[in-house]
Image (tube, grey):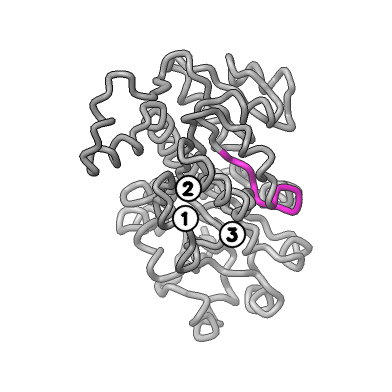
Amino acid sequence: MKRIKGVYFCAERSMERVYGPDEQEQIARRLDMYPCLVTRENWKNHLDALSEAEVLVSTWGGAILNEELLQALPKLQVYFYGAGSVHELMTEAAWNRGIRIMSAADANAIPVAEFVLAQTLFSLKRGWEYMQLAKAHSPELWNVNKRVPGAYRSKVGVVSLGRIGKRVCKLLRPFDVEVMAFSMDTSAGLATQLGGVTFAPLEEIFCSCDVVSIHLPLNAETKGMIREKLLTMMKPDSTLINTSRGGVIHQSDMICFLQNRPDVYACLDVTDPEPPERGCPLYELPNVVLPPHLAGSMGQETRRLGKCVIEEIDRYLANGHLQWEITREMDQISA
């Protein structure tokens, strides 16, 4: 039986992070894979292989399906993308041609949610602040009445309930915290799925929660959505966490707020731009933590993305089903 022809198309530095020898061997048992890696820079050197490719296997640095590249891929049916957002990759021409695409965003959500859980619990102990005080040999460090909310009956706010926001809510279940969430979807089905989560307006979350974690998608409606009015409502000694996109927070508003409210800490895994420009106050503010986009898949975690793609290939070969397919409509909402 003739096997489906596939091509690896991604950035060279990303290839073995996601598709190591074991993953490549498993994919080779399922698809007839072209032996060379195709990239955005060299694809015109591999036109013969691309002309026969029925599927692309990819990750970060994947093919952007513009008109020129689509002409080189006349047989392309499915794009297996072992990473998160596909918004940059799928053009109107690709959607119109009916090319299907899947994303490993659900697998990538796992380490992000775990990172948020760790930061949330650490922040409820005011961990970052007291680490700084310890290094400064501050006498306040040994004050028995430290300003620590703690992880008992504290309130944690989750802003937006996409893949990651929902997973964060579930990870918080074993802990004695009250979880409040802002979502456009407040259906009974979602409430039942999350169990114990209280839906609330943004204003209530910002003014009552000890930790506020942002999980908004970045699109025209959400760009700059978190502004000074909301930020100034934050409780004393609370923490803001952002692992979504830097652009959902109005950055100059946030900087001004953090300068005026040294009691509030911000753990910003993402910024706008990323990284912040040289001289940006975020580098110097003592109440800002800047992990350099660490929340997503790192190290061995990236192999989980490859595993997700392999499982999706199996489903496609069995009956054409894609569990993690992204449609045009979904892409518009989650971009």
Please, is residue 9 above or below residue 139 in the view?
Answer: below
Q: Which residue is outermost to the bottom?
A: 45
Instruction: Identify the mark at residue 282; answer none if there is no mark.
Output: 1
The answer to whether any part of residue 308 appears in the image is yes
- Camera-near label (3 vs 2) is 2
Give yes or no for contact between labels 1 and 2 (Cβ–Cβ under 8 Å): yes
Specify the farthest residue to the right.
96
Q: Which residue is mark 3?
A: 79
- Taking the spot 29% from the left edge, 42% from the top edge, the residue there is 132
Q: Which mark is residue 88?
A: none
Residue 217 counted in the magenta span? yes
Please report the residue visible at 46 percent of the width from the left and 26 percent of the height from the top.
171
Asked if residue 36 is positioned above or below residue 279 in the image, the reply reads below
| Secondary structure category for the residue under label 1 | helix
Amino acid at pointer 1:
Leu
Marks 3, 1: nearer the viewer = 1
The residues bearing labels 3 and 1 have C-alpha atoms spaced at a distance of 38 Å
| For marks 3 and 1 on the same chain, the one whose residue lies earlier in the sequence | 3
Return the x and y of residue 38 as percentages of the image width and height. Answer: 47, 74
Q: In x, y percent, where is residue 145? A: 33, 19
**Boundaries of the magenta span:** 214-223
Q: Which kind of residue does numbered mark 2 sit on? A: Leu
